[in-house]
Image (cartoon, rainbow, N blue to C red):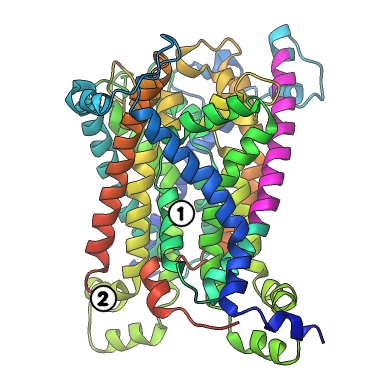
Amino acid sequence: MSKKKISIYVCAIALLFWTLFPIYTLVLTSIEQQVELVSAPPHWIPESPTASNYLQLLGITPAVSGMMMGTVETLRVGLLNSIIIALAVTGIATLVSAFAGFAFGRYRFRGKMQMLFAILFSRLLPSVAMIIPFFYLFNQLGLLATQQALIITYLSFSIPLATWVLLGFFATLPSEMIKSARIDGCSRTSSILRIAMPMSRAGIVAVAILVFIGCWNEFFFALMLNGGTPAQTIPPAVASLFGVQGGINQLGQPAIAAATAISLAPVLVLGLIFQRYVTRLRIVDPVTIALELPEGA
Amino acid sequence: MRGKGYRRVSDASYAYLLIIPLIIFELGLTVYPLVYSFWTSLHNTNLAANTDKYVGLANYIHVFTSSATLNSLQLSLVFMITVVISSVLLGIGIALLLNEEFVGRGLVRALVLLPWAIAEYSCAIMWSGIYNQSYGFLNGLLMQLGIIREYTSFVTPAYAIYAVAIAYTWHYTPLGAFFFLGSLQAVPQDLYSQAKIDGAKVFRRFWVVTRPFMRHSFMIVAILSVVQALQALDLVFVMTFGGPGVATQVLPYLVYRETFATMSLGLGASLAWTLSALIIALTTVLFVLLTRRR
């Protein structure tokens, strides 16, 4: 092996270690007994691994303590809320932004640049800046502690992001097919639905995954608007087991780690899928849009 | 067939039709909340004390003269600079590595993105276990490697902000790395071969051939990481809750605390606007600097 090959493998191993070490510690914690976990130096391979935390949390075996029983219920409700909210937002945001992204990517119209800058601008605001008006607004509308509150909140983040990513995708589609469909008498709407959308399937799937992961992982609004209520999603549910804001966790690290791992499973799978699309996303900036993007649809 | 009726609508009006839903969402969910929160920032709104009177710029004067703001601003800048530099350098390194041919590259590529998919609050739980001072995995590892002699605490007043920044870098780097990788894949291979024939060494090849192709992704990643690092809250929220003491009380956390600890929404809103203004200003400066030469 050449010197270069060796250094490539050394770097690859270092990279894998950096990436996987923290994930490994979580998995390790979740399958160890509390006694073994606190041993120093740590047992990198557990002597008596157990899946009992996973089995209890997933409701496969009965919970061994009252606290565990409560946790199982919290997780179950949290997962259900998370699935409903993330799916609703993904559906609506992808639909709205597919059309908007097409308009921005392929048509020239007055006010386009200003609107694009406004969309980017809205992404610059931190969630702590938005929580005050949202809290007030939902309080007025009686929507606090409901699934709708989080769906509306997440749409406000997801639509600009999804529009921006899809815009780059639509802008780079070859114009010929869309144009010839139009000449053949296809209406604009059906040329979008029948030609442009199927051609951009990869981009749309990638955006849908991106939005879903974003919703599934969102913590701050989920905590402030719905935390501790029946409409709570999985992030505040798991964080409350860990003891947010200095609260004490009595469940024990292994069970908390197992709950965290369960909450991560769906997004890890989606992350693996997303990896195949991510290098094909073309993230554009406003100057590129103004100067380089093609015209016509 | 259906064409006639549709063609009377011009392309521009059709485009407006397509973006109407987006505009409604933007007006309702961004513009309105912004106006409301700016309005609040000019009042002494406090839900606990039940006050809500117009006070002009008094909240902003309080924010700009308070030592807590200064401390948080410093911490936020340290956090941001650490995250931006390490995630950009590491990201370029990872992209260059993943662009090389080696056995198992597909697997490594797939695994490398995982930390990005893991939410910040989960990262906080994970890294708390790693940094833990009585049984933590980092302590165990360093001890077994003979680097430390006894278990130490990493989350100390002096180092806590860096400990949090490392955890954040772990979570955030992969996304940028993949943006860089995307731009590397656009470099035509014959440019490399030509440079090799011309006798250019590795670093020179990177500088002359690769770098121009990475300029755009560099701008995107740099701006994104500045924005994200200044907005980051969840990690601190779950892992250190601003501590020990105020050692990790970055600006977003200060906004949270000022707003909800005493329910003073007016003060919180003015602080939130100050943070937003900082992010907008930095982003604009970066954008102008990085696009100037075009």
Q: Which mark is residue B294?
A: 2
Please tell me whether residue B268 belongs to the stretch shown in magenta: no
Residues at marks 1 and 2 on the same chain: yes
Q: Which quadrant of the view contains residue B243? A: top left
Q: Amino acid at mark 2?
A: Arg
Q: Which mark is residue B175?
A: 1
**Residue A290 on image: x %, y %:** 39, 74
* Mark 1 residue element: helix
Q: Which quadrant of the view contains residue B206? A: bottom left
**Residue A266 on image: x %, y %:** 67, 42
Magenta part of the chain: A70-94
Decide: marks 1, 2 in contact (CB < 8 A)? Answer: no
Q: Is residue B81 left or right of residue B2?
A: left
Task: Name the residue at 80% across, 83% down.
Answer: B2
User: In the rendered view, would you say B32 is above or below A119?
Assistant: above
Residue B162, visible in the rendered structure: yes
User: In the rendered view, would you say A143 is above or below B2?
Assistant: above
CA gap, disc 1 to disc 2? 26 Å
User: In the rendered view, would you say A110 is above or below A123?
Assistant: below
Q: Which quadrant of the view contains residue A116? A: bottom left
Q: Quadrant of the C terminus of chain A?
A: bottom right
**Label 2 marks which chain's residue?**
B
Q: Quadrant of the N terminus of chain A?
A: bottom left
Q: Is residue B76 left or right of residue B231?
A: left
**Residue B177 on image: x %, y %:** 42, 58
